[in-house]
Amino acid sequence: MIALKEPISRFIVVAHNNKHIVQKSSIEHRIDDLIDIISFRIQNKELDTVAESVFEKFFELRFEIFEWFYTNNDDKNILTELQEKLNQEIALKIQLSPYSNLAKILASVLDTYSQIINPILDKVDAHVLRDFITDHDEVNKPNYKTIALLQLHPSPQMQYMKRWVDASLKLEFGFLVAELLLTEQIVLSEQKITNLIEFLDTTLIHFGAYSIFTEFWQPTDGNTSDRFNKMEIFAATIELDHNIYQKASKDAVYHLIHN
């Protein structure tokens, strides 16, 4: 499962602002390279365009960081420590316009994201996950090009696993940009910040809908917010588009829309 409960963007932001946290130069170089590319492209291009242009780099960096976490037992608490550090930095900016609304939306999106990703990862045996991430050589290491082949599979649900991975990368990208802004490592116009807020919300809904359609996750009775309702509507629409009636009927879609 190419995801962890805590978005890796949080680690990237703190590591970029605090050199030598990572005792692995290749990760430091990848982080610097990714942020330089994003910082340059985001000024003049749409968020979706920039996100898609760095999917492969983001995927490879994310996987290398996962490997580093799992192979450095002494640093097993580092992500929690870095998250606390980042939260302290962001807390200082929450009251500053236009950051206050962004910080509020970011916190809300992160909370909803955790309600989706945590149940998904809870189903995965910890030892299996560790072996998947660490037990391979460079030749057989998972890469984005391999994931992209899923869209060629005849099964719609397999095809949407590729979209699920892309949506997770887009969310990581959105988290990264928001946290770079809130720690003043990049500067964007107020309009671009407004676009980022919309980007985070839309991408989260897509991620949730793809999680439902691929059967990675299903909302529970406790998931009652408008966001979860939109995810279910979108997932049901995808099912109907692919004639997968056994999972959601037209009456169910109508019920979701009108309740």
Image: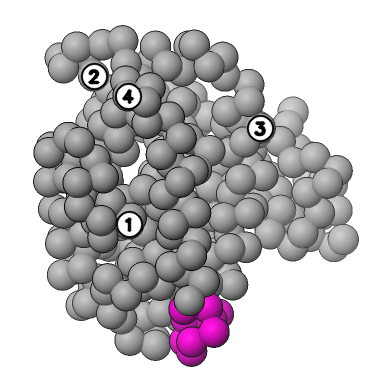
Give me the residue at 15% from left, 62% from top: 36
Name the N-terminal-most of marks 4 and 2.
4
Check whether the beta carbons of the residues at disc 4 and disc 2 lie within 8 A of each other.
Answer: no
Give me the residue at 39% from left, 11% from top: 131
Q: In which quarter of the image is the C terminus?
A: bottom right
Q: Name the residue under label 1.
A: 13
Give me the residue at 63% from left, 21% from top: 123
As shown in the figure, which amino acid type bears the numbered disc 3? Answer: Pro
Q: Which of 65 and 137 lies nearest the eye of the viewer?
A: 65
Image-quadrant location for residue 62 = top left
**Distance of mark 4 from mark 2, alpha carbons?**
19 Å
Q: Is mark 2 on a helix, strand or loop?
A: loop
**Distance of mark 3 from mark 1, alpha carbons?**
26 Å
What numbered label is drawn on residue 141?
2
The crowd level at tag 2 (other Cα within 10 Å; few <14, some 14-19, many 20+) is some
Q: Is mark 1 on a helix, strand or loop?
A: helix
**Distance of mark 4 from mark 3, alpha carbons?**
25 Å
Q: Mark 4 points at which residue?
A: 72
As shown in the figure, which amino acid type bears the numbered disc 4? Answer: Asn
**Distance of mark 4 from mark 1, alpha carbons?**
20 Å
Give me the residue at 59% from left, 72% from top: 104
The crowd level at tag 3 (other Cα within 10 Å; few <14, some 14-19, many 20+) is some
